[in-house]
Amino acid sequence: DIVMTQSPDSLAVSLGERATINCKSSQSVLLSSNNKNYLAWYQYKLGQPPKLLIYWASTRESGVPDRFSGSGSGTDFTLTISSLQAEDVAVYYCQQYYSTPITFGQGTRLEIK
Amino acid sequence: QVQLQQSGPGLVKPSQTLSLTCAISGDSVSSNSATWNWIRQSPSRGLEWLGRTYYRSEWYNDYAVSVTSRIAINPDTSKNQFSLQLNSVTPEDTAVYYCARRGLGEVFDIWGQGTMVTVSS
């Protein structure tokens, strides 16, 4: 199984400031035949289903604000929120879909400082 | 648009069977391009993929190793839905359970509303 490890476990950022969450996979999730990274990011708020933010490591889902961006390749990935808003308080998960079983990181709790 | 509607009890006794159903609208459980998944979320374990069912000329299932001995995910083509059965539950199975579609984009793009299941006597 591919193990996904996020850092940090929790993060407090001031409103309007940048938030950065890292995700590392135990093996590469880059498929060389199509040059795509099988890595997604989700936002989770209590009482709601997870919301897909980013897929293919850097493609923003339709309707997701452009302050959310994803980067990285191979085994190291980053989710960046460029200017934190109050509604961004949530737990963020990375997920690999390169191989079965699909696995998630342990989550990063993002709060307002 | 595609929607998933979950149903099932929110309280299950230890050692009994957890049963949930996910009704699909706007897509087909027999789709050749989607897979139909169950995922759970708990504070202690985070998001955990449990398994999937899908149709590619015949039916297939895949399950997480952690639950493979006591899980079954079955399609019901007559009702366009799929179900989760988890046997011999313990308090560690207490979680919010979600059904989700993995579509052409290969990510979980459509989710059910979630069912909080508590395992307690």
Image (tube, grey):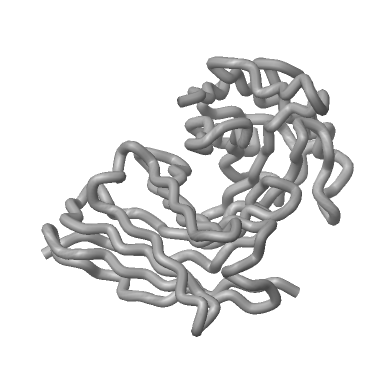
In this picture, residue B25 sits left or right of residue B49: right
Position above or below: B81 against A56? below
Specify whether residue B39 is in view.
Answer: no
Q: Residue at x 67, y 38 (%)?
A: A41
**Which one is nearer the viewer's eye here, B106 or A14?**
B106
Residue B110: percent from left, percent from top? 65, 61
Residue lying at the far bottom of the rendered structure: B78
Quarter of the image holding residue A97? Answer: top right
In this picture, residue B87 sits left or right of residue A29: left
Residue B62: percent from left, percent from top? 44, 47
Position above or below: B15 against A96? below
Image quarter where the C terminus of chain A lies is top right
**Which one is nearer the viewer's eye here, B24 or B75?**
B75
Q: Give the mark count.
A: 0
**Which one is nearer the viewer's eye here, B72 or A14?**
B72
Q: Residue at x 50, y 83 (%)?
A: B79
Position above or below: A76 against B20? above
In this picture, residue B37 sits left or right of residue B109: left
